[in-house]
Image (cartoon, grey):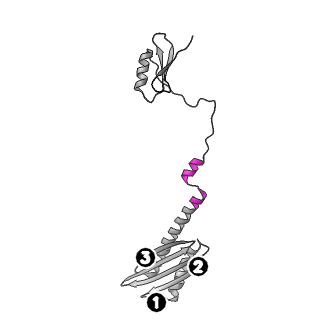
């Protein structure tokens, strides 16, 4: 990793330079080739460490103030490491398509044919076909109604026709 250390209102000693290089080693492990620009400032009692890392066409930045310069550098490294991990994880998910949504879409539902897959239970009332038609009109979401025909005593079905205006009646022959 190429490291450029700049001191403003502070002299960058060999000890500070070595510490910065050692700590940036934690960030360097994420990239093949990267460069870092470290700016160290002193303002009154506050020591400021600002670190820019450029790698793979992306820039990561962290700025921290502390009374201790070494603590500010440590905090910056932690921030940068978090940013880099988050960015890498996000890219890996996008590349692999292993997000939760894509897993649900990839699940194949086995096709079921020639089997009863749903059973509905309902009450069959003895009414006339005309009353059944009126009851079906009251339930716009239903397409049919099964009932016992008062006149014949047999089970009948009244259903909506595709035109949406008329009804059909199904009666057993025997």
Q: Which residue is mark 2?
A: 1
Mark 1 surroundings within 10 Å by alpha-carbon count, few (fewer than 14), some (14 through 19), many (20 or more) = few
Tell whether label 3 touches label 2 (CB within 8 Å).
no
Q: Quadrant of residue 30?
A: bottom right
Name the element at disc 1: loop
Q: CA distance from mark 1 to mark 2?
A: 22 Å
Location of residue 120 with respect to 124 vertically, above or below: below
* Residue 116 picture location, percent across and down: 59, 29
Q: Dot 3 lies on which element?
A: strand
Residue lying at 63% horizontally and 37% vertically, measured from the top left? 111
Please tell me how crowded label 2 is: few (under 14), some (14-19), or many (20+) other residues with Cα within 10 Å. some
User: Mark 3 = which residue?
Assistant: 64
Q: Residue 53 versus residue 131: which sits nearer the camera?
A: 131
Say which of marks 1 and 2 sits in front: 2
Residue 71 vertical placement versus 133 (above, below):
below
- State how far apart marks 3 and 1 are (Cα): 18 Å
State the image coordinates of residue 123 (x, y, percent, origin top left).
Answer: 46, 21
* SS class, disc 2: loop
Q: Which residues are magenta?
A: 92-119
């Amino acid at each position: 990793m190429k490291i450029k250390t700049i001191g403003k209102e502070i002299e960058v000693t060999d000890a500070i330079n070595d510490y910065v290089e050692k700590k940036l080693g934690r960030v360097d492990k994420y990239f093949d080739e990267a460069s870092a620009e470290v700016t160290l400032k002193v303002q009154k009692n506050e020591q400021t460490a600002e670190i820019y890392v450029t790698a793979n066409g992306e820039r990561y930045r962290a700025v921290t103030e502390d009374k201790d310069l070494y603590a500010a550098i440590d905090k910056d490294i932690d921030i940068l490491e978090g940013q880099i991990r988050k960015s890498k994880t996000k890219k890996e998910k996008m590349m692999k398509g292993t997000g939760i949504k894509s897993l649900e879409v990839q699940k194949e539902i086995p096709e079921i044919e020639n089997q009863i897959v749903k059973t509905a239970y309902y009450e069959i009332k003895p009414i006339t076909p005309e009353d059944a038609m009126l009851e079906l009109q009251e339930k716009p979401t239903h397409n049919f109604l099964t009932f016992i025909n008062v006149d014949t005593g047999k089970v009948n079905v009244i259903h909506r026709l595709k035109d949406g205006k008329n009804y059909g009646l199904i009666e057993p022959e025997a």
